Image: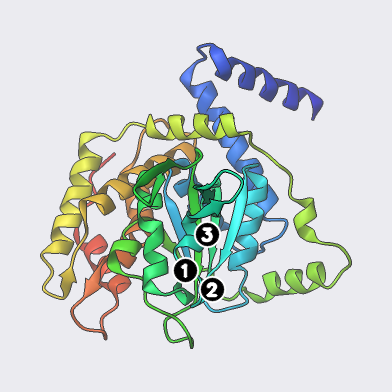
Amino acid sequence: MDKERKEEGQIERELEGKQVPEQERIDWACRVLQSIRDNLNKVVFGKEEQIEAILNAFCAKGHILLEDHPGVGKTLLARAFGKAVGLDTSRIQFTPDVVPGGVTGTMVYSRREERFTFRAGPVFTNILLADEINRGTPRTQSSLLQAMEEQAVTVEDAHYELPYPFFVIATQNPLEVHGTFPLPESQLDRFMMLLSLGYPDTRAEDEILRTYASPGDPLEEVEVVLSPEEVGQLAELSAGVYVGEKVRAYILDLVNEIREDSRIKMGVSPRAALGLARAAQGRALMKGRDSVLPDDVKCLAVNVLAHRVVPVSYSDSSGEILREHLDRVPVPEA
């Protein structure tokens, strides 16, 4: 163990200033990401696929929306992730009485200085947990639009940059739950992925009962894996993963066919197509590769695109429509 940690430390030092072979950097990223997965698996059981998707988005600097019924572990997963990556984390519990200034910050009058000064809101952090975001009003929800797109906010005509990195993990309850407001399409389009945790299987639920019915807080077992500098290195490596011509053509064929479907009234935006490519880069990096395969795109397409596609009929499922197109569009050979 000491030898392995020494080798990792050597790579980290080299990453700070020296050139190292690309594969060594990719191997380092794989070890770090596996360590984060191992830590999250200490507190969230049976959700390996969702944890991997969150890491994909994190490497690709994309935001995550977790949608499911109350009590399945959405907030717990978000809190554990924030601790594992070692970044400043703040939380907003959205309710109908939360106002936009409670998210971005407000101007406050200082009697001592006899002028208004800006008091930063909870959005000024590295990881923002927007808990039950769809219990906030549409006006308050929209206060995150600029932050998620530009990593900045504007208050009283003044522009304020947010800390780097800035990553939103939002949770929401299904719309049929009492007291929720639907997220506008412009808000949904800023989330790279929509994930659902679902109910655990019997084995995972037994592990939940055994772990959380015992003394102590399992979150205390989660270790800090990354430094802020290493987060930037992961993002740089992910952005450097090669997206070849065949993969780009596959993405374009897929999104264009979805747009032409008569059952769809709002298709895939260019931001969504770019998000799919970036998410695929993150997945390739996690798998230890320096280039994206068509399977990376196919594996992530529903999570990245389904929440951005609006069917004409409420009886149609955007996920099912997307799966039809994924089966129909030819997958190029790698």
Relative to the observer, which residue lies in front, 294 or 32? Answer: 32
Q: Nearer the viewer, mark 3 or mark 1?
A: 1
| Percent x, y of residue 31 | 61, 35
Q: Is residue 27 above or below residue 128?
A: above
- The vertical placement of 297 against 171, above or below, is above
Q: Which residue is drawn at the image coordinates 21% and 83% (left, top)? A: 313
Q: Estimate the spatial distance between the alpha carbons at disc 1 and disc 2, rounded to whole Å.
A: 31 Å
| Residue drawn at the location 79% of the way across and 52% of the way down | 221
Secondary structure of the residue carrying tag 2 is: loop
Q: Which mark is residue 50?
A: 3
Mark 3 and mark 2: Cα distance apart in space = 10 Å
Q: Position of residue 309 (x, y in %)?
A: 25, 67
Q: Residues within 10 Å of mark 2 (few under 14, many from 20)?
A: few
Residue contact between numbered discs 1 and 2, judged by CB atoms under 8 Å: no
Q: Residue at the top extreme?
A: 18
Regarding residue 287, the answer to whether it shows in the image is: no
Q: Which element is circle 3 on?
A: helix
Q: Amino acid at mark 1?
A: Val
Instruction: From the top left corner, tell me how far across and down residue 53 is, in percent.
Output: 48, 53
Q: Relative to residue 264, is residue 243 drawn left or right?
A: right
Q: Amino acid at mark 3?
A: Gln
Secondary element at tag 1? loop
Q: List the single residue furthest toward the right.
A: 215
Q: Which residue is mark 2?
A: 198
Is residue 98 visible in the rendered structure shown here? yes
Residue holding disc 1: 99
Who is closer to the viewer here, 251 or 120? 120
Q: Is residue 191 above or below residue 317?
A: above
Calculate the distance from the C-alpha at mark 3 to the C-alpha at mark 1. 31 Å
